[in-house]
Amino acid sequence: MTDKEKIEYIANIYGLDKQLPILVEECCELGQAALKLTRYPFDPTYKNHLYEELADVKIMVEQITHLMGSENIQPYITAKLNRQIERIKG
């Protein structure tokens, strides 16, 4: 099984109702890990913890995207990226 297939399999087993609260939890843990790294930028322990939490959030986002349909999300991604580019350009 590829990683994508594993993500979809897990998402299909648990479903949206069970995975949404896990996404929230993982996002909170990512935020905490990011703050720790800003306080201790030279400590590899905190950098590794950030990598771990990024992986958790990425997995959960991919599960939710699969369950909700990436075709429904892509227009929002495009609009937000375009808006940020326009902000940068001034």
Image (cartoon, grey):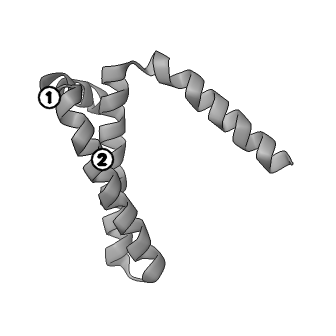
In the orientation shown, which residue stands out farthest toward the right? 90
Above or below residue 37? Residue 27 is above
Characterize the local packing of mark 2: few (<14), some (14-19) or many (20 or more) Cα atoms within 10 angstroms. few
Characterize the local packing of mark 1: few (<14), some (14-19) or many (20 or more) Cα atoms within 10 angstroms. few
Above or below residue 64? Residue 48 is below
Above or below residue 60? Residue 47 is below
Give the residue type that dot 2 points to: Val
Give percent across and percent down for residue 77: 57, 31
Residue displayed at 35% across by 21% down = 68
- Residue 56 seen in the figure: no
The residues bearing labels 2 and 1 have C-alpha atoms spaced at a distance of 15 Å
Rendered image: mark on residue 24: 2
Q: Quadrant of residue 66?
A: top left
Rendered image: mark on residue 14: 1
> Residue 5 or 34: which is nearer the viewer?
34
In the orientation shown, which residue stands out farthest toward the left? 13
Residue displayed at 29% across by 43% down = 23
Give the residue type that dot 1 points to: Tyr
- Residue 21 seen in the figure: yes
Residue displayed at 58% across by 22% down = 75
Label 1: element kind:
helix
Give percent across and percent down for residue 5: 25, 25
Give percent across and percent down for residue 57: 34, 47
Label 2: element kind:
helix
Q: Tell which circle, 2 or 1, labels the residue nearer the N-terminal end.
A: 1
Q: Quadrant of residue 37?
A: bottom left
